[in-house]
Image: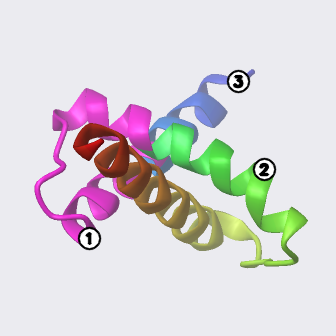
Amino acid sequence: MAIEALLIILLVGAIAGWLAGQIVKGYGFGLLGNIVVGIVGALFAGFLFPRIGLGLGGGILGSIVAATLGAVILLFLIRLVKRA
């Protein structure tokens, strides 16, 4: 993997994690935590969305939107598990 691709993955993960933390109030994990939440959210969205027929387009903006939606779902699941 090229260094540019790794930087883009980290950037998309950071933006998506931060946005998800803003949407789901009270769940900010700091920079590193937001990157991890964003990347895991992107993986979750990449797995789930095609199976339900949801396509968000390509490019960096589509990747950020998909990763953010996946991260929001992930944070809601974390919130449900912590309450139980």
Amino acid type for the residue under numbered disc 1: Ile
Residue 54 coordinates in the image, percent (x, y): 79, 78
* Residue 78 horizontal/vertical position (percent): 36, 43
Image quadrant where one finds the N terminus: top right
**Tag 3: residue type?**
Ala
Q: Residue furthest front?
A: 84
Mark 1 lies on a secondary structure that is: helix
Q: Is residue 32 magenta?
A: yes
Q: Which residues are magenta?
A: 13-37
Q: How is the image coloured?
A: rainbow
Query: Mark 1 Cα within 10 Å, few/some/many (few <14, many 20+)?
Result: some
Along the viewing direction, whichever of 80 and 16 lies nearer the viewer? 80
Mark before the other along the chain sequence, 1 or 3: 3
Element type at mark 3? loop
State the residue at coordinates (37%, 37%). Answer: 35
Task: Name the residue nearer the viewer: 62 or 8.
Answer: 62
Q: Quadrant of residue 51?
A: bottom right
Mark 3 crowd level (few <14, some 14–19, many ≥20, 10 Å Cα): few
Residue beneath disc 3: 2
Q: Residue furthest left?
A: 26
| Magenta residues, dominant SS class | helix
Of the residues under marks 3 and 2, which one precedes in the sequence?
3
Q: Which residue is mark 2?
A: 47
Q: Amino acid at mark 2?
A: Phe
* 46 shown above or below 58: above
Q: Which residue is mark 1?
A: 23
